[in-house]
Amino acid sequence: MRFLFYTHSLVSDWNHGNAHFLRGIMRDLVARGHRAIALEPEDGWSRTNLVTERGPFAVERFGSDFPELTSFAYRPDFDHEAWLAEADVVVVHEWTDPALLAWIGRARRDGGRFTLLFHDTHHRAVSAEGDISSLSLADYDAVLVFGETLRERYLRAGWGSQVFIWHEAADDRVFRPYPDIVKIGDLVWIGNWGDDERSREIGEFLVEPAKELGLKATVHGVRYPDAALGALAAAGIHYEGWLPNAEVPRAFAANKVTVHIPRRPYVESLPGIPTIRMFEALACGIPLVSAPWSDSENLFRPGSDFLYARDGEQMRGHLRAILNDPQLTASLATSGLETIRNRHTCRHRVDELLGILVQCGTTQVLDQLAAKEAAQ
C-alpha cells in the first residue's frame, strides 16, 4: 500500500519527539513492502531551529541515518492533490497547518479514495482546547491518539467520527542495547527544557539528586535558558545540547542509569501517557527511575521494568541503589527490555495501525487479508 504522512518534520528531531516514532513506523512499513512517504513544511519550526543551531549538515545526515526513508519539503505552491491521488492511506499530524488539514479533509470528502487519519501526540486537546476544537475533522475517517485519557477527551468533545488509541513505541532497529560500549558516566538524561512545563521537576528529580550524590551526569536537549544551564553547571552536570536521535542508544549505553521526567500537563491532565523516551530508554536496556506519573493503562510493570520515585528523596535512594547493586541493575534492564520487545516496538504499532485500517474499511488492507487467507 501507499502511505502518505503529513508531519511537522521527519528529517528533524530538534524538540520534535514525534519524528522518532514516525521514523520507526515508516521503516517498518517499508520493510513489509509498503511505500511510505512523508511530507513536511519547508519552513517547519523544528527543521528551521536545527539548521540555525547546527547547520545544514544536521539535516543532511538524516539520509545517512535513515537511508530507507523519504521526506519531501513542501512550499505554498506544492501540488498536494497529485500526492493524495496516489495514496491509499493518509495520516495527518496535529501540528499540520489548519488550513491544509481542512483542505485534505475536503479532498477526502470530494471523492478521495484514500483512508484519512488524524494523529494527535500532544497535550493541546486539554492545554489549548481551542486549537483542536477549531480543526476540521468531520471528513476524517478516524482519529489516532496516544493514550486513553486523550481518547476520552476527543469522544466527550465529539471530535472525529472514530477515535483509536495508538500509543507511541520504540524503533528497536535503532533503540537497542550496546553491551560492548564502556560505561563512562553514572547518569544521563535526554530531554528538552521546553516551555517551563517541567522546570521544577527537573530540579527535584535530576539536578538536586545528581548534585547531592556527586554523580558524573550528562544532559542532552535543547531550549535550556541561561538559568537552567547555570543550575546544571552548579550541580556539576555536563550539558551537551542537541543529540541526534540515532546517537541516543550509544549515549544510554555509556551510562549506568537514566531518569524519566514527564511534562506537567501530561501528569495532571492526561495521566497514563509517558514520554516516548521511556519506551526508547527501556529498549536500550538501561535502568530507569521515573518521576511520578500514572501508568493507568498498564503499559509497563512498575517495580520490575523501572522504579517510581515519588519525590526527590526517593529518587536519590533509587539512584544510589542502582549504582551500587549490580543485581538490581541487571534485573531492571532485563525486565524493561523484555516488555518493550513483547509489547512496545514500532512493529507492534504497525500491526495495530493495519487493524485500525480494517475497522475503517480500507479496501487495500481487506484485499490483502483476503488474498492471504486464500493462499492458506
Image (cartoon, grey):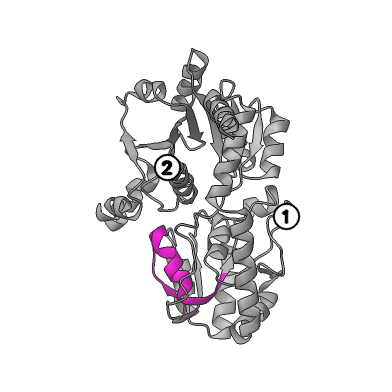
Q: Is residue 233 visible?
A: yes
Residue designated by label 2: 30
Q: Is residue 147 left or right of residue 68?
A: right
Residue extending furthest top?
110
- Whichever of callouts 2 and 1 sits on the residue coming sooner in the sequence is 2
| Amino acid type, label 2 | Val
350 with respect to 20 (left or right): right
Locate residue 140, reporting x and y percent. 56, 24
Disc 2 is placed on an element classified as: helix
Q: Quadrant of the C terminus?
A: top right
**Which residue has dot 1 on it?**
298
SS of the residue under disc 1:
loop
The part of the chain drawn in magenta is 235-258
Relative to 22, 75 lies left or right:
left
Q: Identify the residue at horizontal 42%, vertical 58% (top origin).
A: 245
Instruction: Tell me residue 32's x, y (percent).
Output: 46, 42
- For the residue carrying disc 1, how many other residues have a C-alpha within 10 Å: few (<14), some (14-19), or many (20+)? few
Mark 2 residue crowding within 10 angstroms, few (<14) / some (14–19) / many (20+): some
In the rendered image, residue 171, in percent from the top left (x then y), is placed at 49, 54
Q: Nearer the viewer, residue 133 or 147?
A: 147
User: Would residue 346 be counted in the magenta stretch?
Assistant: no
**Is 101 displayed left or right of 307 in the figure?**
left
Q: Residue furthest left?
A: 56
